[in-house]
Image: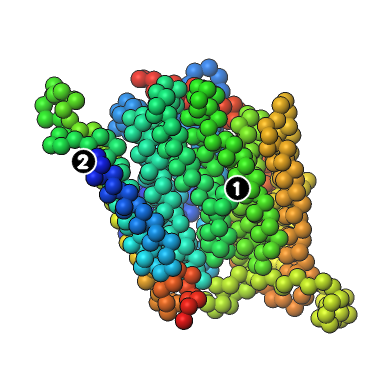
């Protein structure tokens, strides 16, 4: 296998975006073709990296390390590929492959430079998953954020710009916190390489340890803003609801970048090997913060008045669940959490795409408003309710094929997000919850366990309410014409979820190995810092 | 020198934070700029303050203790460039919002007459 495979997921979208800028806005077919080719290539690359990571289970180094310019790791910049990175790369590529065709139809023409921005977003995401040092993490975060600002504003309109303004302001402030945290950590330890940090932290003198913890906490807040932990996540539902559906589908993945970093740094820097003073630092905050986030998300979801907000609060609940599970720091729970991460990302991305198709396709300004749900009124309290049911006519209940397809997709999304059998959402939630109370559970574990189940139930309630109002209550509701590409994207994502259900054991085995690898950072540290390295 | 720098960073950060919480978009962007100045100065100072010390080796076998730590300087350069670009982008969003909503309130709607 080529040694340079690890850097390709970053270089490829960058090169494609540059080419697209050169090709210009006029040659739409060429630009779209380039994007599609890039996404397909990224899926192939990520699959190769995943198989490579899975094949490293035996003795020897379990991580692939790529040194840019071949400088030793302590001085130079490294890219590190292990099971978790490969998994996230593949997830990114798959969601991108599904979001792209959905965008080709209606949304691409609503503004400029959609495709190059999309590729830059992919570059930032891939870079953040692969990088091995904190400052490059910042740089890749900025790349993906800058692209996401452009994409969030894509299509313009007062509502979108207003939501985008908040999004940009909040994230710029979070970036400042990120820089502060990075510089504090550097001031204490003198390095920004994650592996070197993991090695140095147990030996940090006691008088500067508080400073190190302060730096790590400030860094953590920056990531928690991206993850939308309560009370740092009020920006999320509004921004996601206002974005174009394909963009929102990609954004569903962006909150997972924060989770990825918290998982990676939490276990690498503050795992069991960090010494008695530092091990487990911040995990209580993540656990209780996750619990608070789930509560906030459930309340928001039950009160949501349109499909975009409903999906946005689902993102919040998913983030809270993951935060709590990651905060527990048990290998078996982490494995389940990874499964939940994959499934909930796919589910929410699908839901954003379905919600986009259900939105009436009026003029440019009309389409700003996502499908509004009727305010809840008890049946029989007004004349409207009687009218609705009295005039029921059997002949009108014939459901045309596209609507049936949308309804089935909606149902599948609801099952996935609520975690009900038979789809993979249930398997993932079960894999996460089953080991949660094993042994001597931590203080918040019971609360988290109960809340995840309650959140599932509330998701069912909210989704049922939305589904009834969209598909049953109003037979005259007109649905916009769905394009083949848009439907194809949904089918691709749902098919993948179905495949994960059927495949069952093999993906779970991979995730368990990934969790074990995360909980045993010695191998990662050795792989990065050894002078020869275990290059691919 | 340390005290002066610390006070300067503190004043910049405090006034920036106050402006960030104000309701007008122009105040927010000035606040963001001030906060980013504070952060940049902070990054610059983490390597220790040295007067007249080079960050780059002049001869092959120099005494490293006579040189300033070059890494924070490289970091702050990157942070300045990125911060400048994102602030410019925010400025565009701010002006678009002003154009679309007809006022400069961060929520797009002005509560006060």
Q: Which residue is mark 1?
A: A319
Q: Residue at x 70, y 67 (%)?
A: A402
Q: Which x, y percent locates residue A350?
A: 63, 55
Q: Residue at x 64, y 70 (%)?
A: A371
> In the image, are marks 1 and 2 on the same chain?
no
Q: Is residue A127 visible?
A: no
- Chain bearing tag 2 is B
Q: Which residue is mark 2?
A: B1
The local crowd at label 2, few if under 14, some if 14 to 19, many if 20 or more residues have their Cα within 10 Å, is few
Q: Which mark is residue A123?
A: none
Q: Secondary structure at mark 1?
A: helix
- Along the horizontal axis of the image, is A320 left or right of B29? right
Q: Residue at x 64, y 38 (%)?
A: A325
A507 versus A498 height, above or below: above
Quarter location, residue A500: top right
Q: Secondary structure at mark 2?
A: loop
Q: Which x, y percent locates residue A277?
A: 50, 25
Q: Residue at x 62, y 39 (%)?
A: A287
User: Residue lying furthest left in this view?
Assistant: B59
Front residue of B55/A521: it is: B55
Q: Which x, y percent locates residue A424?
A: 71, 44
Quarter location, residue A322: top right
- Along the horizontal axis of the image, is A339 left or right of A265? right
User: Residue lying furthest top in this view?
Assistant: A59
Quarter location, residue A489: bottom right
Q: How many marks?
A: 2
Task: Tell me the quarter of the image containing the C terminus of chain A.
Answer: top left
The local crowd at label 1, few if under 14, some if 14 to 19, many if 20 or more residues have their Cα within 10 Å, is many
Task: Tell me the quarter of the image containing the N terminus of chain A.
Answer: top left
């Amino acid at each position: 296998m080529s040694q340079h495979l690890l850097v390709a997921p970053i270089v490829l979208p960058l090169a494609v975006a540059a080419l697209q800028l050169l090709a210009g806005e006029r040659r739409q077919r060429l630009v779209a073709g380039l994007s599609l080719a890039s996404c397909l290539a990224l899926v192939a690359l990520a699959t190769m990296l995943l198989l490579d990571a899975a094949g490293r289970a035996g003795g020897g180094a379990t991580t692939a390390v790529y040194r840019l310019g071949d400088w030793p790791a302590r001085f130079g910049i490294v890219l590190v590929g292990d099971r978790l990175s490969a998994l996230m790369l593949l997830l990114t590529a798959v969601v991108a492959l599904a979001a792209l065709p959905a965008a080709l139809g209606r949304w691409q023409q609503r503004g400029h430079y959609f495709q190059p921005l999309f590729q830059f977003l992919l570059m930032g995401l891939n870079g953040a998953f692969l990088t091995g040092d904190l400052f490059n993490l910042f740089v890749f975060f900025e790349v993906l954020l800058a692209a996401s600002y452009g994409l969030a504003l894509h299509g313009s309109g007062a509502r979108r710009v207003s939501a985008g303004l908040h999004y940009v302001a909040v994230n710029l402030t979070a970036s400042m916190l990120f820089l502060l945290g990075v510089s504090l950590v550097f001031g204490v330890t003198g390095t920004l390489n994650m592996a070197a940090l993991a090695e140095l932290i147990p030996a940090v003198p006691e008088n500067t340890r508080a400073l190190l913890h302060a730096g790590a906490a400030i860094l953590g807040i920056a990531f928690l803003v991206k993850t939308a932990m309560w009370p740092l996540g009020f920006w999320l539902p509004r921004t996601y609801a206002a974005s174009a559906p394909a963009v929102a589908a990609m954004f569903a993945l962006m909150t997972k970048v924060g989770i990825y970093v918290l998982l990676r740094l939490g276990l690498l820097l503050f795992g069991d090997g960090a010494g008695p003073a530092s091990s487990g630092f911040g995990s209580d905050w993540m656990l209780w913060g996750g619990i608070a986030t789930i509560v906030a998300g459930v309340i928001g979801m039950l009160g949501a008045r349109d499909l975009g907000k409903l999906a946005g609060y689902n993102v919040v609940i998913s983030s809270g669940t993951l935060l709590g599970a990651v905060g527990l720091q048990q290998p078996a729970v982490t494995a389940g959490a990874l499964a939940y991460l994959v499934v909930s990302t796919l589910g929410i991305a699908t839901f954003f795409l379905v919600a986009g198709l259900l939105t009436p396709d009026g003029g440019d300004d009309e389409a700003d408003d996502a499908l509004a749900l009727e305010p809840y009124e008890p049946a029989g309290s007004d004349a409207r309710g009687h009218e609705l049911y009295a005039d029921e006519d059997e002949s009108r209940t014939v459901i045309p094929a596209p609507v049936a397809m949308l309804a089935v997709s909606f149902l599948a999304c609801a099952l996935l997000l609520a975690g009900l059998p038979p789809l993979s959402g249930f398997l993932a939630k079960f894999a996460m919850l089953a080991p949660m109370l094993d042994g001597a559970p931590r203080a918040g574990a019971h609360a988290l366990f109960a809340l995840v189940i309650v959140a599932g139930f509330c998701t069912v309630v909210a989704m049922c309410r939305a589904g009834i109002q969209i598909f049953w209550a109003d037979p005259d509701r007109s649905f916009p014409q769905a394009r083949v590409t848009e439907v194809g994207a949904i089918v691709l994502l749902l098919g993948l979820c179905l495949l994960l259900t059927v495949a069952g054991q093999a993906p779970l085995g991979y995730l368990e190995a990934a969790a074990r690898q995360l909980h045993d950072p010695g191998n990662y540290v050795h792989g990065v810092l050894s002078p020869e390295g275990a290059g691919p | 020198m340390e005290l002066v720098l610390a006070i300067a960073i503190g004043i910049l950060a405090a006034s920036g934070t106050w402006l960030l919480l104000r309701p007008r978009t122009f105040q927010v962007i000035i606040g963001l700029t001030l906060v980013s100045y504070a952060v940049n100065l902070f990054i610059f100072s983490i390597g220790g303050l040295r007067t007249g010390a080079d960050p780059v080796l002049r001869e092959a076998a120099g005494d490293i203790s006579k040189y300033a730590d070059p890494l924070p300087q490289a970091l702050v350069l990157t942070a300045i460039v990125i911060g400048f670009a994102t602030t410019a982008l925010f400025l565009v969003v701010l002006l678009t919002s002003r154009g679309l909503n007809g006022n400069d309130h961060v929520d797009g709607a002005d509560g006060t007459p």
